[in-house]
Image (cartoon, rainbow, N blue to C red):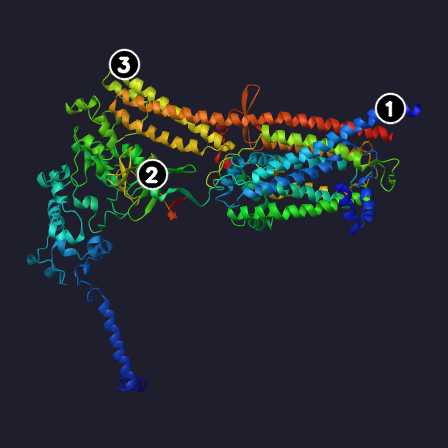
Amino acid sequence: MIKRLVDAWVRQRFDVDKMRGPVEKQLKKPLPHNVGWFHTLGSMSLFLFLSQVVTGILLLVYYRPTVNEAFESVKFIMTKPYMGWLYRQVHAWGANLMVIVVFLHMLRTYITGSYKKPREVTWIFGVFLFIFTMIFGFTGYLLPWNQLAYWATTVGTEVAGSVPIVGEWIRTLMRGGPSVGSETLSRFFVIHVIILPWLLVLLVLIHLFLVRLQGVATMERVDEEKEVDKAHGTPFFPTHVLKEGIVFYILLGILITLAILAPFDLGEKADPLTTPHAIKPEWYFLPFYQVLKYFPKLAGIFVVTLAPIFLFLWPFLDRNKERDPRKRPFAVGFCILVLLSLFIFGVVGYLSETERQLFGKTYYFDVYGLPHAGTAAEHMAKLTDAEVK
Amino acid sequence: MSHHRNLNHQAAHFITNERGSFFVYFGILIILLFLSTHPLFANTDNENQCIACHSDYWEEMQASIHSRNGVACQDCHGGDPAQADQALAKGPETGYIGVPEKDQAVQRCGNCHANVEFMNPYGIRTDQLARYLTSTHGKRVMVDHDMKAAACMDCHGYHDVIAVSDPNSPVYPSNVPKTCNHCHGNERLMEPYHHPTDVFDQYRESVHGKALFEKGNLAVANCAACHGSHGAVPPGVKDLGATCGKCHVNEKKYFLESPHAAAMVEGKFSECTSCHGFHDVQHPTAALYEKACLNCHATGTTEYQLGQAIERELNNAEQAFEKTKGTVKQAAIEGFFVEEEAANLEEVKTHLIEIKSVQHTLNNHFLTERHDAIVKSTDEIERSIRHKRLSHKQRQWMLVPIWVFIVIMVLVLYRKYKQLKNQKD
Amino acid sequence: MSDMKTNHAEQPETSRRHFLDWILKGGFLATLLGMFLPALTYLWPVTRRGPVGGMVEVGREDDLAVWGAKKISIGESPMILLRTPQSFKAYSAVCTHLGCLVEWSADKRLIECPCHAGFFDVEGRVISGPPPKSLVGHTVRVVDGKIFVKL
């Protein structure tokens, strides 16, 4: 009854029928057959972004972005307000999951050759989204102002500062001064809370618009794509959306489970006078951080910047018209190589400068990741002064 | 010939005209001014002619507290400072004594510094001479005429005496040990007196030395604090307690309640140093009970057992505190709200420090009281934190209904999805 | 006859579908509520004060006699609050010697440390004993009969 009244009221003012057409078209848009479970990753990226925005806004209510209060405010959030701990953990885990899911989405796009003509621009926007997601992570990581945050940011900005010519300038700009301090916190906060969210909203909208405009890629060769019609395609709504719903619920479950079973520490308040041993950046920066160690400064910067450059240029470097991964052995092989090296260097980076017990014996992995028999203390004692530096 | 004459004529003409006269008078003035600054002719602020020749001493004296207060050469050395001529300045009626002998110098210092009326406006004490005369140094110098022993200037300096509160003064608290060591670390000098010369090294490694030199704590004991400064004597066995007890008030108070107090009166036991040592005092730990008691008590005796029991309790209390400190810290790192527990821990810390004073009573009963209080508090803190951890664990139960709900939704969604797919096909 | 049969066959099918739809709609609603209702409770002010930052209320003026003192704890910092005839004073109760908590001696009108007999005056300065530095002072303000201390 009420529904009919509201309907009538709206119809008297807005041309509902004119809107209905395009909306239905978008909703019922047929997707090619190759669209499977892995094609839900894009929506999951969006879901995680929205989750971060919502939990981020909630955290913002109690968070104080000053050096004196930041740590205490996070402690307050974790202990006092109802479910405060949950929002903090969901936000922290959500950040990590978002990097993973965006990466997997990018991987899927690569494997299905969807980045090829005519969708190169969509891919470019996507790479930007991935990079900005990592910057989101980097800036957000500092905000709790604990020891991990402070020193990881010090190391990270130091690496940025080793770029030739403009390095020092970049580092000072990032830090807002000679070292990480209240200025750094302020600017990271601004970037994390206003600049990046709106930037990502804009980029996501453009990215989605392009996807919708050009339609989801099929597995046909470049320049041979046939338009998907209703009879042969799967409707976006409700069929594909149901798939997304399933993956959404499972992802939500994983997120909450991680928040409860593996919560992040509050940590110790940042102490600029005490450097903890072996500071490392967050896991998604580890492979690059580790690779940098093996090269002298300039060479290292060059090698590491190859990665994003390659990502951007890939659709233009790849001349193969095939989309089917089985018909692109080189591209797939290259991809596996990259994944392996990311994994290996990531693990090596994780193990470096730590003491581990393997098969009953103690090993110390040095800064390059090479294992030495004995404990950390024993290894340190053997180092010469030059090596210690 | 005519050339010369011409020049002479020109010179005479130059001097006699107006411009020339001006230059001549001006030149004479310059020369006079220059001569007036020469030390031989210069007048100083206080018209002191000594420094005309002895300028190097004047440099030393300039920054000294004496020269700033109008004490000059003649006050210690005699002589007439107004005389520029050496014979007149140091003549017999001037009271000139040259470089005084040590005992002479002591008297000279005392002329002012022991004069209560004179020193009144300066606000410094006037008992230094009196104390000095009772000291070992004083007796050696004034009675035995042994000039090798220390007198005023050996510690305070000669011409460059500055205030004790000035960090550059050789008797500023952190400089005292080094000053004493000048003589007391010199083997040749100390040999006839059979004094040990390693005291400075011992002191430097001691808890007092480390506090003074490494942490800059000026309130800590230095040579003068225990031996006295002007009245320096090695404290006798009975006096040690008074010396240490100046700062370690509670320990002294408790010690006097212990069975050792009687032994001290009888002279068999030195109040603090019997167990703790003196120059090389280290930060005491409960392990001291292993070594120190054995000096007099054999293992197996009741006394020794008591010491062991006390040691056990102390260690137990210390361990309980350290363990709970770690628990509270770990909980704080993880993000638990433990401010109340941390505040309680501060109180436990106070008890722990108190117990270290109380142990000097060697009375197990007092100790046990405090030990039990410490253990009770730490147990409460541990319990409180365990409780908080438990309530966190209870959050895990939330997962059960959540996953049940998720599984239901996934199944329903999947069912629907399958339905739609079948419909289409 | 066949109509009846198909009708009959359809009925459980549609009702099952409706049932499923009903669960789905309910589930989505539950999910949304589950996300946003806790957020409302989260937003409701939880204590009188938010994260500790400025002046903290520690008691009432009338509860503290002149020349009296009170031990208070702000966050993790133990403090001692004094009242002189002229003003209120607050100091960190941690003795600067070895960290024992100091106490107020009403008859001596001095702050004393029970561990090694360190004495501080009402300004927190060391009068005698081993403490090397004065007690750390904190600003106190009295507004409307309430005592506030600045951390």
Chain at tag 2: C
Rendering coords of residue A115 (x, y %): 78, 41
Q: Residue A224 carries which label?
A: none
In the structure shown, which secondary structural element does the residue marked by tag 1 occupy? helix
User: Which residue is most to the left?
Assistant: B93
Q: What residue type is labelled 1?
A: His
How many numbered marks have been drawn onto this rendered protein structure? 3
Q: What residue type is labelled 2?
A: Lys
Rendering coords of residue A352 (x, y %): 57, 31
Q: Dot 3 corresponds to which residue?
A: B299
Q: Marks 1 and 3, Cα distance to the nearest angstrom?
A: 101 Å
Decide if residue C30 is on the left or right side of residue B54. Answer: right
Compared to residue A73, the image places residue B415 above or below, namely above
Q: Which mark is residue C70?
A: 2
Closer to us: B405 or B148: B405
Q: Nearer the viewer, mark 3 or mark 2?
A: 2
Q: Marks 2 and 1, Cα distance to the nearest angstrom?
A: 84 Å
Are both tags, 2 and 1, on one chain?
A: yes
- Badge 1 crowding class, 10 Å Cα cut-off, few under 14, some 14 to 19, many 20 or more, is few
In the structure shown, which secondary structural element does the residue marked by tag 2 occupy? strand
Q: Dot 1 corresponds to which residue?
A: C8
User: Which residue is most to the front?
Assistant: A1
Tell me the quadrant of the picture where the C terminus of chain C can be found.
top left
Closer to us: A205 or A319: A205
- Badge 3 crowding class, 10 Å Cα cut-off, few under 14, some 14 to 19, many 20 or more, is few
Decide if residue A376 is on the left or right side of residue B35. Answer: right
Closer to us: A206 or A84: A84
Closer to us: A347 or B75: A347
Compared to residue B302, the image places residue B209 above or below, namely below
Are both tags, 1 and 3, on one chain?
A: no
Visible in this render: residue A135?
Answer: yes
Tell me the quadrant of the picture where the N terminus of chain C can be found.
top right
